[in-house]
Image (cartoon, coloured by chain):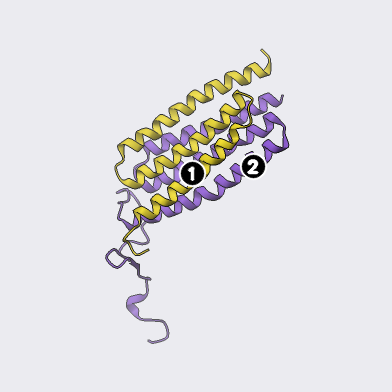
Amino acid sequence: MDTLGFLDAVVSVCLGVLSVALGLALLRLVRGPTLPDRVVALELVATIFVGVVAVHAIGSREPVYLDVAIVLALVGFLGAVAFARFIGQGTGR
Amino acid sequence: MIHLLVAALVVIGTTFILLASVGLVRMPDVYMRMQVSTKGASLGAGCVLLAVPVFFGDMGVAVRALLIIVFIFLTTPISAHMLARAAYMVGVPLWEGSVVDELAGRYDRERGELASPDEEEGPPGTA
């Protein structure tokens, strides 16, 4: 088996494992129990998606997908900061 | 040979991301979930993103991938810190087995202020 075929198999398996990780994060997103729990889960979902996009960029030999990862990382950070300000509203600062 | 290195990096990164997700489900309170998911996921995403420029061997791709890695490693601690602070301020409880809470009893929720530990004894130099 040549190494490129081996890499393709590894990429397929890793996409499956990342899907399982995404499912676990969504489980925490649904179960809660508090709002900060859900925000942490959302942040993890954004980071997992960055990993999925990077693995898919290797699997499809298409480096353009990295731009999607940049935007996802940016939006995930801004969302987490906005949610932190929203949760902390009315508690001093 | 390069392909084997890429496969190793992808497998390591994916494993770390999966462990972060398992920790997010298994840990007992918000603060532990936060620390396990932010550290594990940023390390895992960093490993996977490091595999991309190794695979393509192109300068433009390498710059973009390193940009994402630096961005993730800069912003994840900041957002985790802000979230943990907000969660403590609104009174999300710690796990009952937690050993130490150094802010216990020092945070006034109505006024939104933190008191320093020596405040009852007066300012230093007046005694």
Query: Mark 1 belongs to which amino acid?
Result: Val
**Residue B66 in picture, x, y percent from top left:** 64, 42
**Does residue A74 appear to the left or right of A85 in the view shown?**
right
- Say few, some or many: other residues with alpha carbon within 10 Å of mark 1 (under 14 / 14 to 19 / 20 or more): some
**Residue A11 in picture, x, y percent from top left:** 57, 23
- Which color is chain A depicted in? yellow
Please state the chain letter of the residue tagged with numbered disc 1 in the rendered image: A
Kindly identify which residue carries mark 2: B66
- Which color is chain B depicted in? purple
Query: Mark 2 belongs to which amino acid?
Result: Leu
Q: Quadrant of the N terminus of chain B?
A: top right
Between marks 2 and 1 in the image, the one whose residue lies nearer the viewer: 1
**Residue A34 in picture, x, y percent from top left:** 30, 45
- Say few, some or many: other residues with alpha carbon within 10 Å of mark 2 (under 14 / 14 to 19 / 20 or more): some
Q: Quadrant of residue B115?
A: bottom left
Q: Is residue B61 visible?
A: yes
Whether A9 is drawn above or below B115: the answer is: above
Q: What element does badge 2 sit on?
A: helix
Kindly identify which residue carries mark 1: A75
Q: What element does badge 1 sit on?
A: helix
Q: Is residue B87 visible?
A: no
